[in-house]
Image (tube, helix red, strand yellow):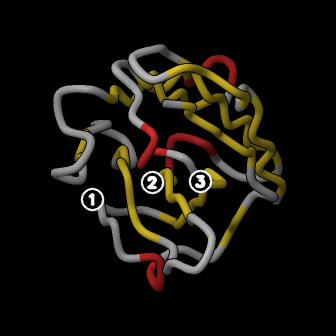
């Protein structure tokens, strides 16, 4: 199983970025996919997730209304559209997968992880 993130970068506050997570080696529709982030000196926290099959979506309160998660089953890809970015969104963003289930933002429930992509928001 491989998860590869892309789309990170440097953006000014108020700007937008779209992250992509391409999954391979797994039955994509059977897996819930989540985005986590980790800022320096902080714990990894859940940002958003999308369930397997029905693709229900969930968001952390800190990003609700600004971030949108979506999936393209034909491309085995999950996206995270991030709008109205704030300096506190600066972190390494990781995608993660787990077999079958509803959404969860608990990092302990995921066992496949990507290498991460850096997002930096300047003030």
Image-quadrant location for residue 45: bottom left
Confirm or deny contact between disc 1 and disc 3 (CB under 8 A): no
Q: Which residue is mark 2?
A: 32
Q: Is residue 17 above or below residue 58?
A: above
Seen as rendered, the residue at the extreme front is 123
Residue at x-position 17% and y-position 27%: 65
Instruction: Tell me residue 27's x, y (percent).
Output: 65, 48
Confirm or deny contact between disc 1 and disc 2 (CB under 8 A): yes
Q: Which residue is mark 1?
A: 102
Q: Which residue is mark 3?
A: 91
Instruction: Tell me residue 121's x, y (percent).
Output: 56, 34
The one of 95 and 123 positioned closer to us in this rendering: 123
Q: Is residue 15 above or below residue 70?
A: above
Residue at x-position 36% and y-position 41%: 53
Q: Is residue 43 above or below residue 21?
A: below
Callout 1: SS: loop
Quadrant the N terminus occupies:
bottom right
Image-quadrant location for residue 41: bottom right
| Relative to 123, 119 lies left or right | right
Instruction: Tell me residue 29's x, y (percent).
Output: 51, 41
> Alpha-carbon distance for marks 1 and 3?
25 Å
> Alpha-carbon distance for marks 1 and 2?
7 Å
């Amino acid at each position: 199983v491989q998860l590869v993130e892309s789309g990170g970068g440097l953006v000014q506050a108020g700007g937008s970025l779209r992250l992509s997570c391409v999954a391979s080696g797994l039955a994509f529709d059977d897996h819930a996919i989540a985005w986590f982030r980790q800022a320096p000196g902080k714990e990894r926290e859940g940002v958003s997730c999308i369930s397997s099959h029905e693709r229900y979506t969930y968001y952390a309160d800190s990003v609700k209304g600004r971030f949108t998660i979506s999936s393209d089953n034909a491309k085995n890809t999950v996206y995270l559209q991030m709008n109205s970015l704030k300096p506190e969104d600066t972190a390494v963003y990781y995608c993660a997968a787990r077999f079958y289930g509803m959404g969860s933002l608990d990092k302990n429930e995921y066992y496949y992880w990507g290498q991460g992509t850096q997002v930096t928001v300047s003030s």
